[in-house]
Image: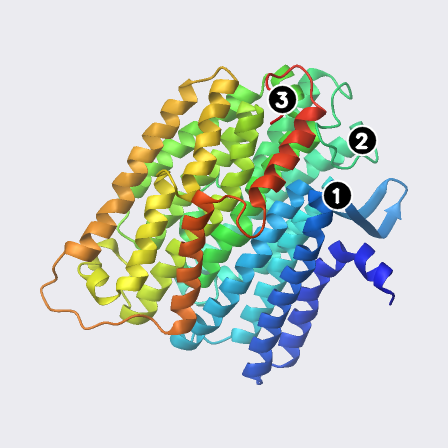
């Protein structure tokens, strides 16, 4: 294999490396150290491959490969562009942290069935990268459905009745959505044969407005389930019966991010912002996202289970991405893409903290957190950072995306959505800050005698919490997420007409 061949096919290697790891894991059922080493090596290797593509993509190049052609115009086509690289870099980096955390968590809780668990984790991340680097709708759909099948066993991993029921609900929701998505994709391929993702979209003028409106609704339903847009969200809180690393995978690394990323691809690279405006679907989607943001936040206020509260928070927060694509201005689009990054770091920190608390104390309800902050100060400091950031406090990563969304609403002449953002911030404060207050200042009937979680659980959450702060001050820190997002937005709006702002 020549160096040139390897470099030209890096999108393919980025997908395959964790599939190879899954095979190694399955072949070493009783060799725990080899199984865990394969997990970590694949995580680091995947990230290194994706990171190696960043300089070229920032320079305006696109790295693509077509490993399989099924028929003329129908191919498995992978491509690293600025938009896809944001999701790929994010998922692969967080997989390293999640893998370390995963090993510590599974050792501490001893769930059993760990070989299949680690193998499914590897396949899930492989499919997430496949989604990120897909160059057309067919390729995205294949990996989208693999992600569903790979995460299903993870949701019911505990094998309790509650876990099995949660897994079944997850599968019913996501497979049904997949069928609607398949209809939308086949219809799109008939309308625009052979078309791949094109900055600014490729459907303008390809079909009557009524057909395009129906197609748009089908895409919203297809991606809306994984993005947990209400009323398609109910699987997500139920899936919180899964082990905490799976919850982190669902919320921060793969599943709901895949749904949110699907909205970005469809809005920016299938329809295009100008066409969404022309067919009148933007306001409808924007209000659906706004209702989800507010109702999910109100629902989170009433949840005592910490993971379920975090789940409803995700339902609301991911609709920021949907809102940004619906507003369809350059700044709103920038806010949508960067919020995928911001939410991932904030929410994985909060889930890691919830898991560390459970692994150490076996407490999982907000009402049981009294005094935890005095016994596990580093863990609760990280939780506090995540909470401050997700509210949208200035100088924290959540502020960067929400600031752009707010100005994007002004740019589009829709200031009403700023009120939605402000109300959401107040509600988010209402369901997170009482947890922090109770943890530090609440007193339990009996003095607690807990301690920090072991290093494999503690260090990942400290790292992701630190990044949540650093990215708020320097959004390009380390991985150039912000510049990649700007490049993606400029490519979309440079090709769109009839919209204010034309780019960034």
Q: How much space separates mark 3 and mark 2, taking CA atoms?
A: 20 Å
Q: Position of residue 411 (x, y in %)?
A: 51, 19
Quadrant of the image occupied by residue 176: top right
Q: Tell me if 112 is positioned left or right of 92 in this view.
A: left
- Number of numbered callouts drawn: 3
SS for dot 2: helix
65 versus 18 height, above or below: above
User: What coloring was used for the rendering?
Assistant: rainbow
Q: Give me the residue at 49% from left, 40% from top.
A: 339
Q: How much space separates mark 1 and mark 3, taking CA atoms?
A: 21 Å
Q: Position of residue 249 (x, y in %)?
A: 50, 57
Residue 231 appears in the rendering: no
> Which numbered marker is on residue 135?
1
Residue 138 appears in the rendering: yes
Q: Position of residue 123 (x, y in %)?
A: 63, 62
SS for dot 1: loop
Labels 1 and 3: the sequence-earlier one: 1
According to the picture, the residue beneath numbered tag 2 turns out to be 190
Q: Residue furthest right?
A: 72
Quadrant of the image occupied by residue 481: top right
Labels 3 and 2: the sequence-earlier one: 2
Q: Give me the residue at 35% from left, 40% from top.
A: 391
According to the picture, the residue beneath numbered tag 3 turns out to be 276
Q: How much space separates mark 2 and mark 1, taking CA atoms?
A: 17 Å
Point out the frontmost of discs 3 and 2.
3
Neighbours of disc 2 within 10 Å: few (<14), some (14-19), many (20+): few
Q: Position of residue 435 (x, y in %)?
A: 24, 51
Q: Quadrant of the N terminus?
A: bottom right
SS for dot 3: helix
Q: Tell me if 279 is positioned left or right of 72 in this view.
A: left
Labels 2 and 1: the sequence-earlier one: 1
Q: Residue furthest bottom?
A: 30
């Amino acid at each position: 294999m020549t160096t040139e061949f390897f470099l030209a096919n890096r999108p393919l290697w980025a997908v395959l490396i964790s599939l190879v790891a899954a095979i190694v894991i399955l072949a070493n059922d009783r060799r725990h150290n080899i199984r865990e080493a394969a997990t970590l090596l694949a995580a680091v290797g995947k990230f290194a491959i994706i990171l190696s593509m960043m300089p070229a993509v920032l320079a305006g190049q696109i790295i693509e490969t077509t490993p399989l052609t099924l028929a003329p115009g129908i191919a498995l086509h992978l491509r690293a562009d600025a938009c896809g690289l944001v999701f790929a870099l994010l998922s692969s980096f967080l997989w390293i942290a999640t893998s370390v955390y995963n090993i510590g968590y599974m050792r501490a809780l001893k769930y059993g069935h760990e070989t299949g668990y680690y193998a499914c984790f590897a396949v899930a991340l492989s499919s997430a990268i496949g989604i990120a680097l897909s160059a057309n709708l067919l390729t995205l759909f294949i990996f989208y459905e693999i992600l569903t099948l790979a995460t299903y066993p993870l949701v019911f991993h505990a094998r309790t009745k509650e876990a099995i029921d949660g897994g079944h609900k997850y599968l019913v929701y996501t497979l049904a959505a997949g069928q609607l998505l398949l209809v939308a994709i086949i219809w799109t391929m008939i309308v625009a044969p052979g078309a791949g993702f094109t900055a600014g979209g490729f459907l303008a003028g390809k079909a009557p407005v009524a057909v395009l409106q129906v197609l748009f609704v089908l895409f919203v339903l297809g991606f809306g389930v994984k993005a947990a847009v209400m009323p398609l969200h109910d699987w997500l809180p139920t899936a919180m019966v899964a082990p905490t690393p799976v919850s982190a995978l669902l919320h921060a690394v793969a599943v709901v991010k895949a749904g949110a990323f699907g909205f970005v691809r469809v809005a920016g690279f299938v329809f295009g912002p100008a066409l969404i405006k022309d067919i009148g679907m933007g306001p409808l989607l924007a209000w659906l996202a706004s209702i989800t943001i507010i109702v999910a936040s109100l629902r989170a206020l009433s949840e005592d289970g910490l993971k379920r509260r975090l789940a409803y928070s995700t339902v609301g927060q991911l609709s920021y991405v949907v809102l940004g694509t619906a507003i369809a201005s350059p700044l709103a689009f920038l806010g949508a893409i960067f919020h995928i990054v911001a939410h991932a770091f904030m929410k994985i920190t909060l889930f890691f903290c919830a898991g560390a608390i459970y692994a150490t104390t076996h407490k999982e309800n907000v009402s049981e957190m009294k005094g935890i902050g005095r016994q596990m100060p580093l863990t609760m400091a990280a939780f506090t950072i995540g909470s401050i950031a997700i509210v949208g406090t200035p100088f924290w990563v959540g502020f960067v995306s929400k600031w752009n969304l707010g100005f994007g609403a002004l740019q589009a002449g829709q200031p009403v959505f700023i009120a939605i953002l402000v109300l959401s911030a107040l509600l988010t404060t209402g369901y997170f800050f009482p947890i922090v207050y109770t943890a530090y200042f609440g007193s339990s009937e009996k003095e607690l005698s807990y301690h920090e979680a072991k290093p494999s659980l503690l260090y990942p959450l400290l790292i992701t919490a630190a990044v949540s702060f650093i990215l708020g001050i320097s959004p390009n820190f380390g991985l150039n997420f912000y510049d990649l997002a700007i490049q993606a937005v400029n490519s979309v709006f440079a090709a769109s007409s009839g919209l204010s702002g034309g780019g960034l």
